[in-house]
Amino acid sequence: MTPTSQEEAATQAAPAAFPTPSTSPPVLPVSEDAYTSLAAPLTRRSDVPAAVLENVADTPFSLYTGDYRLQFGQEALAGALIVTRPNNPTGLALRPLGADLNLLQHVQRVSSLDDQARTGVMLTGSAPWADFAFWLWVYPYNPGLIHYRLELTPRDEIPSGRVDLEWTFVDAATGEEAPAGYTVYADKASFAAPSFYGYAEALDSTLLHWVDLTRLNPFIEATHYSPTGTPARRGRQFGHELSSSDLRRLPAGQTWTIYDSYLYLAPGAAEDEAGMFTRYLHQVGDIYDLIAHPKVSLPDWQSLAQKTLNDLQDPDTWVELNSKRYWRAYVADTRQSAEAITQLDVGLAAARYAARYGSGELADTILKDVLAALPDFYNPAYGMLQNSGPLAISGDQTRGDTWYELGHALKAAELGLLGYDVAADLARDSQAAWMNFAQIVNYKFPQFYTFTSWKGTGREPDAAGGYALYMLRLADLGCGEPCLEEAQAAVRAFPGHGFSFAYETHMTAMAALAAAELADRTGDEAWLAYAYGPIANLLRLSWIYEVDYGAAAPAHTFFGLPPTQRAGAITPKEQYEAWIYLTEFLRRAHGRIDPSVEKLVAEFCYHTLVTLADSLPPRLPDGVATEHPAAYAEVTANRLDLYIPLEDMRDGQSEWGAIGQEVYGAGMAPTFAALAYQQVAPGVTVYSGYPLAKVEDTTITFVGAPGTYAQAVVSGASRVLDRRGNPVETQPCGAALCFQAEGGGTYQLSSLSN
């Protein structure tokens, strides 16, 4: 079918050309014991330098970045840093800790900082109660990007006065507060990416504010500060949400990083929703290069998969009903019923594992019981799989939640495509009902609905992505062109929701993959642009920081993903499924999408493999996970000896597993073991943080962007060569070789048998 004008408009987000992958280490590394980052963004947004420092004399200075001028020492705004645009009466004033305690009133020295990577100044001074250093940087080839950091050394009791947000919209001439005219694109979500994004009419600029929470871990540990409210936005002010009590808890005589933040300004409002997403993705991509990333190693998912498959035989994970075994929703769930979501999760994982590693007793017994149980969840009165069952015990489900039942249909189709006819038949039998549902609601799916009328409440916009992917799977099961047309209609329904598109985040990831598959199936690259909105939504909700404070400090949280917009926890079920669909998205779209988008999605995939391993209780230090979940009366205990994931991973100040252990997410480890380990030649396997985009004999190409690196583990090879045939540095990893694979890089593997 010919794309509509929406697809034609979306081509404005066409990808930039990828640079040639290098064979050298990352440029400009800034390393600490636990973290690494870059000194400048990898992508240049300007062809010529757009950062200038001038007039540094005693304390006054001017610093330019693109359209924006940063001044200090102005008479009307003494003791404040002011950001302005030419011919614009409104500016932004920066006063660290707010007007009452503004540290910049006590600046004693300004030193210039200038190198190839960035241009900036350091302001130092002493307030009556503390010494401080304030750094300010801009980046020559990334106009509008401002980085600032505040270090504080308390010496005495903090004086009375209000600690306030550091940025204020002001009249640039008088310093008086001024209206911002702020339009929200994306406010901060609970515990998610520490940022917000919008348009300020007063500056005629979009504004992305981001806090590098990882750099604030020592401060959080010392003060028991909760980062959930940072950054904050209130009326004409925004910045770090701190209190005088937080500062009083800091031990005197020690130096603490209080701020480590980014302000990314760009002229004008986004022209449309597609432009809003593209600008956001570019800016997040630039900031991502600069923030602290934890140094990580890939977990042994093959070993973890065996332990999970074994623990799924434990009686606390299943229930026998009508002489059949059904897996429970949660460990120690006392309900005498079952849910389709769990049967399909563990069954599909067992099928993937068997397809990858061959027949084995543990996976085979799970798969056999699941295939026997699945028809018990099909309701002929509704013409679809319902979640509650078995039907003979539960009866008709009174209402549905779209992502549940839609997920069942999709997973039945995926299981069918692996060769299991009973699942394929259930997927086909559900087709007519789902088509009717989708067409009646015009692909704008409700949250809760009645099965007989499809009338519902609420909205689940990303369910259109799950529906599109289900239609594409049905197309492969024999439906053909009618299902392809349905998928196209569903993807066309994506726009119009902005950053409210995500409802259930694995559905959001399905939406990105559906767009890429349509590009492949139709030959029209314009479909790829439909993936940018779902991906922007996922990034906004991800925990793009590492919790290194409290009891959970030894565990990983970086790039964790919550299930919904308002959830304050990382949930393995949604995240591991998002990984499935986004890895396939990258394999299909590599080199055809914007490099910033590819980089960010590849990083999500890498860190997902690391972070989700710590959802398995036996890997956690004592005191992180509770043995007593409290969310549901029917879920009586957590079994912290079982390799069944905790439903909820949290920060270091909250107990993990308060909801329980999700058997319906226990397909995680077998799925990672099946899909993350790719056999590229007989006896040669690659397991990597960045998925493989292409395999040609023993030559492999990774997804991702040049200048980024992820661990790769190669089994069955004697050495690794780069694309020019030069040896790559490797280290022994047991019987395998480990090396740092560059995003977009091509490598040659020399087999042990050669």
Image (cartoon, helix red, strand yellow):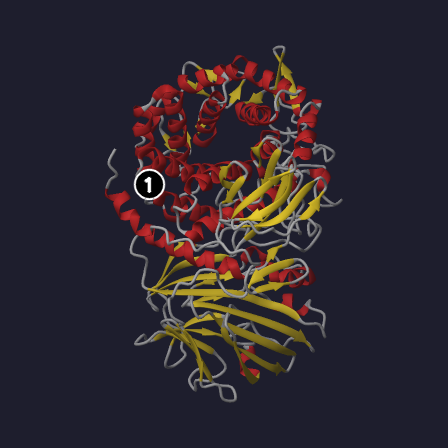
Q: Is residue 608 visible?
A: yes
In this view, the residue in front, 366 or 552, is: 366
Residue 235 is situated, as x and y percent measured from the top left of the image, at: 42, 64
Residue type marked 1:
Trp
In this view, the residue in front, 343 or 529, is: 529
Please name the residue that numbered disc 1 is placed on.
527
Q: Quadrant of residue 463?
A: top left
Residue 316 is situated, as x and y percent measured from the top left of the image, at: 69, 25
Horizontal side, residue 43 vs residue 211: left or right: left
Q: Is residue 443 visible?
A: no
Residue 132 is situated, as x and y percent measured from the top left of the image, at: 61, 77
Q: Residue furthest front?
A: 754
Q: Residue furthest top?
A: 323
Give the SS element for disc 1: helix
Q: How many marks?
A: 1
Q: Residue at x 57, y 44 (%)?
A: 689
In this view, the residue in front, 508 or 349, is: 349
- Mark 1 neighbour density, 10 Å: few (under 14) some (14–19) many (20 or more): many
Residue 693 is situated, as x and y percent measured from the top left of the image, at: 48, 41
Q: Residue at x 71, y 39 (%)?
A: 735
The quadrant in which the C terminus is found is top right
Q: Is residue 376 above or below residue 556?
A: above
The quadrant in which the N terminus is found is top left
Q: Residue at x 44, y 60 (%)?
A: 43
Q: Quadrant of residue 335?
A: top right
Horizontal side, residue 315 vs residue 490: left or right: right
